[in-house]
Image (tube, grey):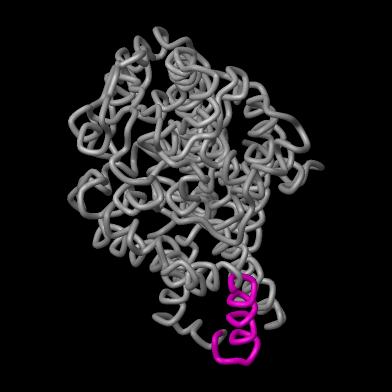
Amino acid sequence: MARSTGSISGRTIVLGLAAVKLIVHLVYNRGYGYFRDELYFFTCGDRLDWGYADHPPLVALASAAGRGLFGDTLSGVRFLPAIAGALLVVVTGAIAREMGGRRFAQALAAVSVIAAPILLAQTNFLSMNAFEPLLWMTFALVVVRIIRGADPRWWLAAGLVAGIGMQNKYSMAFFGASLVGGILLTPERRILANRWAWAGAAAALAVWLPNVLWNFAYGWPILEILRNAGAGKNFEMSPLEFFTRQIVLAGPATFPIWVAGICYVVASRRVRQFRALGIAYVLLFALLVALRGKDYYIAPIYPMLFAAGAIAVERAAESPRLRLLEPLSIGAVAACGVILAPLVLPVLSVDGFVEYSRALGLGHAKTENHEMGRLPQFQADMFGWEEMARAVAEAYGTLSDDEKARVAIFAQNYGEAGAIDFFGPKYGLPKAISGHQNYWLWGPRGYTGEIMITIGIDREDLEKYFATVEEKARVQCGDCMPYENDNPVYVCRGIAAPLQEVWPVTKHWR
């Protein structure tokens, strides 16, 4: 990349790269099918509230807004995540600029964000994770500005962003605590010793307060869900394995960039005021390992490290002997991003994906303790949902008109229930009920349980509660997760007690 001060500014380059990322998402976010969590968030968006058992309300609001503005198409419901991904590029470039990075550093940081597989994947579909990196990095940008001497009243902006982040995903608290912890461990702790820092904390709490009150009213269900997930749902990793996964998730070519970023801010006198950023990564890494968090939980922190690492590369390339470091680094990151993109974007057919990942010598990285098929869980969870709805419709078609008016459709998990809620109207199906996550809080929706269609529940368990259990169909979904394939659809009659009475035992929070 040219080192001269040409007419194209770093801001302009970053904006151009943000447009590239947006276009990539708009082109490739229509492949495969709806993701499991998206179907659940659709239902949450139809029932807006200040909280849900397993997540705060922002993603439900984004679901309602996206579908209301752009319809139920894949590209429509994923438009806001695509915008969040593009804005993340802009914010990362701004962090690099605030830390003293010139044109090249801003460009390399932006390209690293685009090329990082985990960030590319997360901003390509609707989830909390699509907005999480943008909120984390906006918070980091404001803190960097304050460290550089900006008006302390900027803490109010930081608090506002933190509060919105808590309304998106509770992990904002982990990042905020890690970054503040990093500040406290450096001389920059002085920026916390003023009333505006406390005012910012109060602003964050005020924005988050409606969700706090919702959680208090329902007994903080998120804590029970997190305990259950840590007790067996999540795939356990050693600290070394957790770290190794980061190289794959953020991209092998960006690995030297973000490691250099940590080392640079911690060791270099030129940017010593930003040491808190490197320390924050170490603190957050240790916290997530201790809590048995999934490997991608730390992913939103990488853009600020890309920014710091890009500055380190830019400064190193000031030496005549290292002039080639700039074009080599940006070329390697971009090339690696292109090579790995088909693994996280629906660019290829399923057969093509399998062959491509096999050619690269990559296996399936597990995040949960489930049997795997030929697709990784991320891709597999985009298949089979309408097939499942059709199988339920087949069983529903065997009922009399009177039974159809009374039947409840009980799903084992929120993906199945969300699929019934979303695809079901096409087949004349009523809304689903489930004991999984917030579906349990929504309750049995007035159904008595005297006749019920169930998906994915063992016959032995059903026979404990019903007089008759008849298999009427089977879900055949091919490339879906194995535990969703070949599932029986039962019609159950003669419940032992009213559904409202047995509802507590259906609770499945994990």
Judged left or right of residue 473, residue 217 is right
Q: Is residue 196 magenta?
A: yes
Residue plotted at (31% across, 64% down): 287
Q: Is residue 509 magenta?
A: no
Residue plotted at (45% across, 60% down): 171
Q: Which residue in the rendered view is the most extreme toward the right? A: 7
Judged left or right of residue 321, residue 51 is right
Report the magenta stretch's main SS.
helix
Residue 295: x %, y % from top left: 33, 46
Quarter the N terminus occupies: top right
In this view, 483 is above or below 325: above
Q: Which residues are magenta?
A: 192-209
In this view, 243 is above or below 214: above
Residue plotted at (34% across, 17% down): 357
Is residue 319 in view? no
Residue plotted at (66% across, 46% down): 62
Residue 471: x %, y % from top left: 30, 17
In this view, 285 is above or below 483: below
Q: Nearer the viewer, residue 350 or 421?
A: 421
Q: Nearer the viewer, residue 243 or 386?
A: 386
Is residue 429 in view? yes
Q: Nearer the viewer, residue 333 or 483?
A: 483
**How many numbered marks, from 0 up?**
0
Residue 450: x %, y % from top left: 40, 35
- Image quadrant where residue 66 sits: top right
Residue 274: x %, y % from top left: 50, 70
